[in-house]
Image (tube, rainbow, N blue to C red):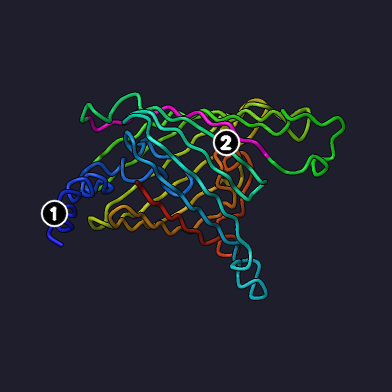
Amino acid sequence: MRNAWLSLLALCPWAVLAQFPLGEELGHQSLRIVNQQAASGPGEGHLEFFIQHRFGDFAQGAYNAFGLDQSQIRLGLDYGLSDRLTLGLARSSWGKTSNGYFKYQLAGLRENRHWDLTWLSDVSVNGEASNVWGLEPFYYSHRLRYVHQLIVGRRWTPRFYAAVVPGVVHINLVDAASDPNDLLTLSAFARYRVQPHINLTWEMQNTLPSVSGAALTSPPMALGMEFIEGLHIFQLSLGNALSMNEAYISTANQGEWNAAHLRVGFNIVRRW
């Protein structure tokens, strides 16, 4: 019995080191705000498992329990090859989409600066059956989309962190010949600490107007609250987006931001 207690005490420092940081680095507490990727990674040798869930919108009415009868889920794994480099894989029921990405923090992590600068590159594959597309001939490349983002974040106060995220989405197959294959996007997010273990979050994504395209009329936006407990984070959200994939969320109009088209969602995070 004594040896068991000694072994437990020996493991305690490692358990403390593995906790989510609850200090001043608000930008480094979770890899995602709601859907949007944050600047941080899990840290070298750490693995993070994400469960993301979105219900249907309230407009479905009482027959569908105001959206609770409909659901989309996304499962993801993120691994820190180093304190700066993160690799991730995920699978979403929306569009049967799989995606992989890498994220590299260019500045801010070790320099003890107020600013973060992180590069994200992502490729997604729509896995729906080829006959769903109604194309002949059908090529595998039709399924592919690519995302590149530069995440620029700043800790404005010990309680408030905010970021802007310019990016580009390349779509191999567009709906019409006149539609652009490359869409410029601009996202933003913020995190505010209410208590040491509770944060309020906000995010928004949109497509920038260009010569061949226009901004979204109903861009995705979400409000959230996250609860941090040891190696777990539980995130509740209220937003208008159904997709949870970077390649789709900012390239198509979502439901309008009103009571009828909002939907409840949650993320569950576990880190090792």
Which one is earlier in the sequence, the residue at label 1 or at label 2? 1
Q: Amino acid at mark 2?
A: Thr
Viewed as shown, does residue 20 lie left or right of 247? left
Residue 202 spot, x, y in % from top left: 41, 50
What residue occupies the far right of the structure in this picture? 136
Magenta segment range?
113-126
Which mark is nearer the camera, 1 or 2?
Answer: 1
The local secondary structure at tag 2 comes to strand
- Identify the residue position indicated by label 2 in the image: 207
- Which residue appears at 32% of the width and 33% of the height? 44
Q: Nearer the viewer, residue 64 or 85?
A: 85
Q: Nearer the viewer, residue 25 or 103?
A: 103
Q: Main secondary structure of the magenta part?
A: strand
The local secondary structure at tag 1 comes to helix
- Which residue appears at 63% of the width and 32% of the height? 145
Q: Amino acid at mark 1?
A: Leu
Viewed as shown, does residue 73 lie left or right of 28? right
In the image, residue 253 above or below residue 124: below
For the N terminus, give its image quadrant.
bottom left
Q: Nearer the viewer, residue 41 or 193?
A: 41
- Identify the residue position indicated by label 1 in the image: 6
**Is the residue marked by circle 2 packed among few (<14), some (14-19), or many (20+) residues within 10 Å?**
many
Q: Quadrant of residue 32?
A: top left
Q: Nearer the viewer, residue 115 or 210?
A: 115
Q: Is residue 114 magenta?
A: yes
Viewed as shown, does residue 171 lie left or right of 8? right
**Is the residue marked by circle 1 packed among few (<14), some (14-19), or many (20+) residues within 10 Å?**
few
In the image, residue 254 above or below residue 137: below
Residue 117 spot, x, y in % from top left: 35, 28
Q: Is residue 166 magenta?
A: no
